[in-house]
Amino acid sequence: MSTVADRAGSRRPAPALLLLLAVCALLFVAALCVGPVPTAPLALPRLLWGDPGDPLSVIVRELRLPRALLAVLVGASLGLSGAALQGLLRNPLAEPGLLGISGCAALCAVLVFYSGLAGHDAWVLPAAGMVGAGGAVLGLYALAGRQASMLTLILAGVALNSLAAALTTLVLNLTPNPFAAYEIFFWLMGSLANRSFEHLWLILPFVTLGAALLLASARGLDALALGEDVAHSLGTDLGALRRRVILGSALAVGSSVAVTGVIGFVGLVVPHLVRPLVGHRPGAVLVLSAVAGAALTLAADLGTRFPLLNGELRLGVVTALLGAPFFIHLVLRSRLPT
């Protein structure tokens, strides 16, 4: 006789994964075509592999292509990290931005900017972001504890976010050059504009390693969903599981934030969107959340390209406008009687 957990996890993720991959592919093509100089989709092969001296070809290959690839990479890392953290903490409100991980990563990156260390070596900036993200996860665990309620977890995340925001504001206040402070301020809003292949290659190894650690936690997260005692009886090393998720989130989120700035709510929204498709099984949610995170980030980045008086919108602003109402919906739903 199958158990309730078996029935809940019996839905096959393959059809949902194929659908999400198709949506992501369509959005990727749109990201290469949409801009101040629109491009026809049928012209993309010629522009990507044609005459390197063609101005439109340069725009597509050197500006839009790395931007779209970064959107996929960063969105996948945020969605995957959010799903893994929700499974580890067994809390549907866990998310890298909400829990202070993105804010602490940004703080360390801003400190590197402020001190001038970012100019010494290309790896300093993502390393600082990863240190900040890892410290935030460890601090969250220390503040909230293993069996944290939603309220405790949110309060711990608010505390970390407040501390990171206060220290970041202090750094901005102490910056002697107003133009540098202005650049840091806009960088903190999160954006994929003006990013190149250099930024992509810079974070790719860290995001890949972090994603591998998070995906390797799938079976452990499935066991943990049944309770710590049951997970122990199934042979799950909970200490190793926590270390994998913490290190994987630090690598993926920290390196992404160091390049793009703070992009919030992606890790909160996408696990909730894909979870019903796989019967709420934490391990099966991981891959789908990565693909859905990439699709959501591509869509949000397309939304930033509407012309404004002072340039385009910032990606972090768009994701916040999308994610905040969803978060309010989750809070209101949690108040309903069960």
Image (cartoon, grey):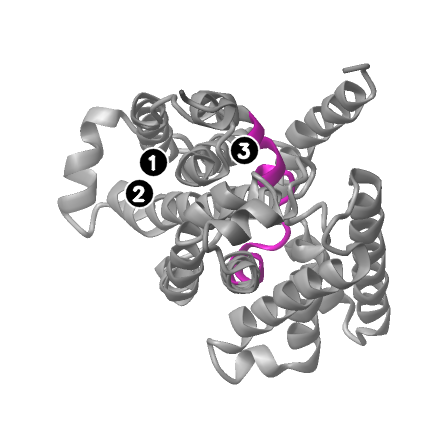
Q: Quadrant of the C terminus?
A: top right
Q: CA distance from mark 3 to mark 1?
A: 26 Å
Look at the picture and state if 78 lies above or below 309: below
The residue indicated by pointer 3 is: 271
The residue indicated by pointer 1 is: 32
Q: Which residues are magenta?
A: 255-272
Q: Label 2 is placed on what type of residue?
A: Val
Mark in front: 3 vs 2: 3
Q: Is residue 74 left or right of residue 186?
A: left
The residue indicated by pointer 2 is: 60
Q: Quadrant of the N terminus?
A: top left
Q: Label 1 is placed on what type of residue?
A: Leu
Residue sitting at x 38%, y 34%: 31
Determine if residue 307 is in view: no
The secondary structure type at the circle numbered 2 is helix
Q: Which mark is residue 185?
A: none
Q: Earlier in the sequence, mark 3 or mark 1?
A: 1
Looking at the image, do the residues carrying marks 2 and 1 touch, with CB atoms under 8 Å apart? yes
